Image (cartoon, grey):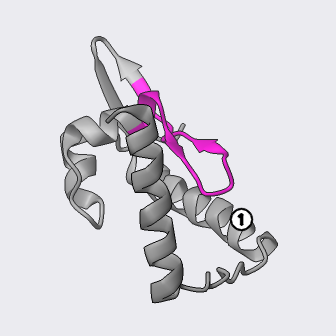
């Protein structure tokens, strides 16, 4: 039988590349993270007594699953180029201001 080297969430936080807080690692276990694809990915863990433990392999798998789900989203999503809205001319802006002032005057403001 193979023994697994479980690590606490504080140690898992120290192993993560961005050094998240142990609370963030706890949230990854309990709630997971929502990938860009909308899929919720959770960090695999075990509960021993009142504490949560995971493994370095589970942490690597968690990050890989997030990256894979993100890749699916970005590969399937066509690049959306924002449309440029034409700016108002000075005369159009002046007309809009006059109209707004007229509406305010009619409303009694």
Q: Where is residue 2 in the image (x, y as percent from the top left)?
A: 51, 42
Farthest residue in the top direction?
A: 49
Q: Bin the neighbour count of mark 1 within 10 Å (Cα to Cα): few under 14, some 14-19, many 20 and up.
A: some
* Residue 30 shows up from this direction: yes
Q: Which of 19 and 104 is in front in this view?
A: 104
Residue labelled with disc 1: 73
Q: Position of residue 93 (x, y in %)?
A: 46, 76
Which quadrant would residue 72 be assigned to in this image?
Answer: bottom right
Q: Which of 57 and 64 is in front in this view?
A: 64
Indicate whether residue 80 is drawn in magenta.
no
Residue segment shown in magenta: 28-46
Residue at image x 76%, y 71%? Answer: 77
Q: In this view, does 96 lie to the left or right of 80?
A: left
Residue at image x 36%, y 32%? Answer: 108
Which quadrant would residue 30 be assigned to in this image?
Answer: top left
Q: Nearer the viewer, residue 108 or 42?
A: 108
* Residue 7 shows up from this direction: no
The image shows residue 31, relative to residue 15, as above or below, that is above
Q: Where is residue 103 in the image (x, y as percent from the top left)?
A: 47, 46
Residue at image x 45%, y 87%? Answer: 90
Look at the image and tell me in which quarter the C terminus lies.
top left
The image shows residue 66, relative to residue 90, as above or below, that is above
């Amino acid at each position: 039988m193979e023994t697994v080297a479980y690590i606490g969430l504080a140690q898992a936080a120290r192993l993560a590349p961005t050094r998240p807080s142990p609370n963030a690692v706890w949230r990854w276990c309990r709630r997971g993270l929502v990938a860009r694809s909308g899929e919720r990915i959770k960090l695999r863990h075990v509960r021993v007594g009142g504490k949560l433990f995971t493994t370095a392999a589970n942490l690597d798998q968690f990050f890989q699953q997030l990256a894979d789900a993100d890749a699916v989203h970005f590969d399937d999503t066509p690049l959306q180029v924002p449309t440029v809205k034409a700016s108002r001319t000075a005369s159009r802006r002046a007309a809009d201001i006059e109209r707004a002032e007229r509406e305010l005057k009619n409303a009694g403001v």
